[in-house]
Image: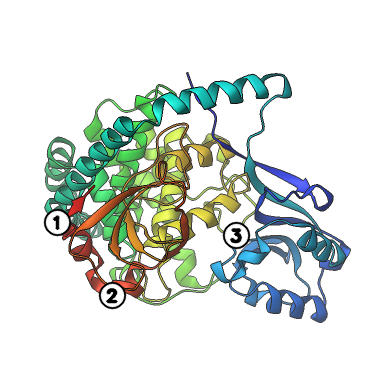
Amino acid sequence: MDHPSKYIITTVHVDELKNSATIIAYTGFSDHYTSIDRKVCAFLHHNFGGSKVLVSRNGKKVELPVEQVREGDTIIQIFSFPSSKKRLTVADPKLAAALKKKGILSFKIRKLRSLPKDFSNDLQEAIEQVNLMMRTPSRKQERLKLGVFRANKLVEKVKEEQRKRKEGSDIIEHLMDSARQGKLNMSDIEVYVDNVVKHSSSEAMSAIANLKSSDQTYSHCIDVGVFFQTLYFKAVDDGKHKSTFQTKNQMLLGAFLHDFGKSQLPKELLDSTARFDTNSREMQLIKKHPQHGAKLLTGMSMPDSIVNMSLYHHVKMDESLNTSYPEKLSYNDSTFETKLLSVIDIYQALVGKRSYKRSWTPPQAMRYLSALAGIEYEESIWDLFLSLMGEFPVGSLVILNDDSMGFVMNVPEKDEDLLRPQVVIIRNAYGEDLEKHTLVDLQEEKDLFIKSDVSVTDVFSSQAINRFSELRIVA
């Protein structure tokens, strides 16, 4: 039986904003935001700095930082608010009145799912009785004991898998270099895939991807692949989706090769550290990689599902977006596998390091992707991704409300609050590093909650993965 999420995402008018709602995006505007003038431009720059916007510009929908909004743009959506703008995301009457006065009229919000009135009283009573029975000290202790065991197991696996990630990145680079020269030898990648499927922990490799920066091509392919392996297996195991792949090896190979078309681009372009303008010649060449990949994979007699992942992973639900390509392809022709891969692809690009941009924290990336649900991909795909990744993906570095700092170690189970994972405390409220690291289960410790997330790079520089690997976790 499927269990609905504790939260729902919906669109409401400004007059319907409630104190219990969290604003994800501003979505409805008065005529003042159509072909905006200098005054509105200045208002947006001043009040929404650090946020993202979706605008209509010259007949195309363009997503960009709010600082790049200019006169003549039409505002479609404001989203991905930085933590410094949290006041813009917590609904209350004062905020609603101010926004209404400024002509901001509708919002995408996340709120607690309400119960039918006929059932709420009886159900609440039943929940309280169950909680009374289940929240006994023995259950709490057993849950914590299991959490400590799993967390230590994850740390051990992360230690083991670091070398394997580097090996995979090198194999992808060699494979692309060979394909560029017209030589295709799949033996190395096939052996690597078999080794990962049989002997590796995809959860540990996914945690590494959240902790350690990657390049924009080779490690990216490996990280996207292991994320896909982890999430796709869980989706199939839940019985909601039937695998279209004949084997697990075939599934992972397809994910690793989603960007294989980049092998047809010049090596210097692929390895460039520059950021290319949307309309530049270089970007137009890069946007051809899905067609190149589909052609290569078809010639290699790869299954249709793998070819679809290569060809459609940049096609958005709203095909008019400037980030949707190849042009004239329909999102409806994407398979479930491709739609899931495309969200993973965006997520990894955000958390991965690029020479021309700062890496996002995993929770920042999740908040950003939440605002794009229903625009770039279906709400159902986002709901699945969120349930499998959590609001705070494994490896996220967070600050609790007591000012202690820790690593997130799990994704809460079904029916649990995704905002309350298990956290291993590595630094106390006084900023002192700890030698032994306590596991705190936020599902149980109701007085504690995550106050904010921070960048592992800012705190630990390039040593984040080492700090995680040195964890000594106790109850």
Please state which of the two labelled residues, at mark 1 or mark 2, is closer to the viewer: 2
What SS does tag 1 mark?
helix
| Residue 48 falls left or right of residue 226 | right
Identify the residue at horizontal 36%, vertical 57% (top origin): 396
Between 355 and 5, which is closer to the camera in this rendering? 5
Mark closer to the chain start, 1 or 3: 1
Mark closer to the chain start, 1 or 2: 1
Q: Disc number at residue 322? A: 3
What SS does tag 2 mark?
helix
Query: Which three-letter amino acid code belongs to the residue tagged 3?
Result: Asn
Q: Residues within 10 Å of mark 3 (few under 14, many from 20)?
A: some
Q: Name the residue that disc number 1 marks.
A: 167
| Residue 132 falls left or right of residue 470 | right
Q: Give how far apart the Cα atoms at labels 2 and 3 are.
A: 34 Å
Q: Name the residue that disc number 2 marks.
A: 461
What SS does tag 3 mark?
loop
Query: Which three-letter amino acid code belongs to the residue tagged 2?
Result: Ser
Q: Is residue 34 visible?
A: no
Q: Is residue 129 above or below residue 404?
A: above
Q: Give how far apart the Cα atoms at labels 1 and 3 are.
A: 35 Å
Mark closer to the chain start, 2 or 3: 3
Q: Give how far apart the Cα atoms at labels 1 and 2 are.
A: 23 Å
Image coords of residue 452 (percent x, y): 47, 63
Asked whether the residues under the numbered discs 1 and 3 touch, taking CB atoms below 8 Å apart as contact, a structural biologist would say no
